[in-house]
Amino acid sequence: MTSKSLPSAQPVAALAVRTNYTMPALLALGILALAALPWYGERVEGSALSLAFSSGRWWLAPPLMGWLAVLAGWRLHRTSVSHGRVITVGALFGLIWILLQGFAVGMRGLDWAWFSVFGTVSEGQPGLGWGGFLALGIFTVLFSQGIAAMGKFRGDGFVSGSVWTIGLLVALFVFFPVARVLVSAFTGPTGHLDLALTWERLTATDIWGLGCLAGGTSCGVAWNSLLLAVLAGVLSTLLGLAFALLALRSGFRWRKSLQVMSILPIITPPFVIALSLVVLFGRTGMVTVWMETLFGIEPSRWIYGLPGVLISQMLSQTPLAFMIMLGVIQGVSPTLEEASQTLRATHWHTFRTVTWPLLRPGIANTCLLGFVESLADFGNPLVLGGNFEVLSTKIFFAVAGAQNDPGRAATLALILLTFTLGAFWLQQRWLGRASYVTVTGKGDAGLPTPLPKRVSTLCYATALPWAFFTAVLYLLILIGGFVYDIGRGNFEPTLAHFRTGFLVEWGERGVNWTGSAWDSFFTTVMVSGIAAPLTTIIGLLTAYVIARQQFAGRRSFEFMTMLSFAIPGTVIGIAYIVAFNVPPFELTGTGLILVICFVFRNMPVGVRAGLAALSQLDKSLDEASLTLRAGSAYTLRRIILPLLRPAIVATLVFSFVHAMTAVSAVIFLVSAEYNMATAYIVGRVEVGEYALAIAYSTLLIIFMLLVIGLIKLGVGERKLGRRSGATTDLITGAH
């Protein structure tokens, strides 16, 4: 249904509001947040209204006026479109006032002196509690309902609510903390604006120097980062594509095993992969010693630098590329390929002119994710970088090292964002405005076209050696947990490391989890189990809004969702501490800040996977449902989501695994009560207990493999109404 097919926007909007039975529930939740739930998180007990009228905290009362305005707009003007304006104004007033008083009144009194025009404030306030956060959410949803009632978003309250709610969440938990850190790029040591210092930081030789081209030792960190990101993004995408083509378009007997090998690296903490590479290829590594013994090759430190960092990043990024490309290849309609074959095209010509162009959205989004993730990764460059410095490690040492120069770190982060913006622009230019729709409402009984021989040969030549290399690497990791010290060549078998970390004893009161690692393991599973579904919901809903809705600032909104992914985790961790350690949002030291960090750190993956999948779905499917008077929420749930199952699996797996194995941001956000697995592992590595760290990683790998299997089983396969009779003979490498 297009906007032209509607008789007018306003009558449809009025109808939507008159039939919107969620308004009473929203109003009830709003008064619950203001009058019953604790407004603050700690130290001060009571709801907003009770504190306002009994404790003299008068600044908590005005949101009630906004709620009353919304109630009046709903009750007195429901038969007119103008009531939407009253609801909008009332909700906007409540929303703005909560944020205004939250930032104006600090822990010890007024932080903004001009706020005193409304009267004196004798005492401060702590951070918001459940009442405050619920009120923010309710006023946001009420505001979006008012906007829909005014005829915006075709009068669809669900679409309006999705756009404004996601916008508020992204602004609050992505833009706000990042901006708090990046503003220091434009200030000097005194905290005042200093553009000259900013320019000096931006043009430093160690950032943009080209000494390596003139016979020097190295180039600037910006060029190093750009080279690494391009190589990692392109190569991991091609590897993921090769694995996906072999899994879906070949007669390879061990396809299932190949898929397992392709996703193994994603379920391992990055530094464990780096440690395994050192054990294999370091100066005294196993492979290095064998090469010297057998062939007389002199040991070197080649693994420390660009090659080692590139290999480790390809290992960590290829699984995500594989999962995204798997869904994209599944979405390519065999009918289009069969039409090409009918016109006497060869398999190679069909692949080059039909299949490959239809894969461009998946390739573009996967390359973008790989590029951005490579820019932001600091764990692998920290362990394997050697003299090959990148922006992320520079940022880490500027913040956490002896320099203690947040302004320089913010400047380097600005360069990272510039690279990300450039990659985002190139992606949009490459995709253009072409249509990549392959999934429509029509029947599709075609069979996939066999891969051209040259393509299948290339896929085998790249995927199989990489799968073998991955298997060797993980065999080494598994062995490392069952020997005394694999790093020093002590291969004597032992279970001591597992007993230290994961001992279980029976006592008088039942099971006692006496191992030192159990607390961090249970906390990690709980936080990851909460964060993964939320990441998937918010990410795919954001992708749906971007792909299917037209509104002002849509492209800027899309780019803003990439901010948290484009900045190193260390900066994100520090940004969250700076932003959420003081009122109105005191979240540091809680489990909630870990969940929020993981949700919005990993959300871009859901957005890009969703956009890649949605680009293949014909909009006529949505429009047919809307024409039959189904709402957007029902259409999304019953029509769109079943067709997005590959994207759902990819997002769930990635978000859960990354929450389980994240290092950079977690280091700054964990607490004694909420310690994470990776923080525990890093602590063991710091004191030299490598075997215990590897043993913990082994348990995490086994556990996450089980969870991935359950995710795939729970989500299920996408059904596209195609024939499933493709035999091995039909999909073998063709001529």
Image (cartoon, rainbow, N blue to C red):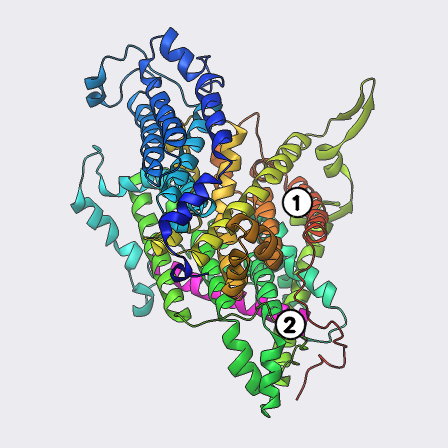
Is residue 511 located in the magenta-colored stretch of the structure? no
> Residue sitting at 73 percent across and 51 percent down?
479
Q: Amino acid at mark 1?
A: Ser
* Residue 661: % across, % down: 58, 44
Question: Residue, x 32% and y 33% (percent of image)?
Answer: 86
Relative to residue 293, is residue 673 drawn left or right? left
Q: Which is more N-terminal, label 2 or label 1?
A: 2
Instruction: Quickly name the residue at label 2.
Output: 443
Q: Which quadrant would residue 529 be assigned to in this image?
A: top right
Q: How many marks?
A: 2
Percent position (x, y) of residue 530? 59, 38
- What's the amino acid at mark 2? Gly
Tell me the number on the disc at residue 697: 1
Most frequent secondary structure within the magenta stretch: helix
- Numbered tag placed on residue 258 in the rendering: none
The residue closer to the viewer here, 211 or 624, is 624
Name the residue at the top extreme.
Answer: 54
Secondary structure of the residue carrying numbered label 1: helix
What is the quadrant of residue 285 in the picture? bottom right
In the rendered image, is residue 405 in sight?
Answer: no
What residue appears at the point 42 percent right and 25 percent down from the top-left corner? 586
Nearest the eye: 219 or 372: 372
Residue 385: x, y in percent?
A: 47, 55
Residue 238 belongs to the span the image colors magenta: yes
Looking at the image, residue 361 lies above or below residue 579: below
Label 2: which secondary element: loop
State which region is magenta. 222-249
**Label 1 environment density (alpha carbons within 10 Å; few <14, some 14–19, many ≥20):** many
Q: Position of residue 314 (x, y in %)?
A: 54, 61
Left or right position of 592 against 660:
left
What's the CA distance linking mark 1 and mark 2?
47 Å
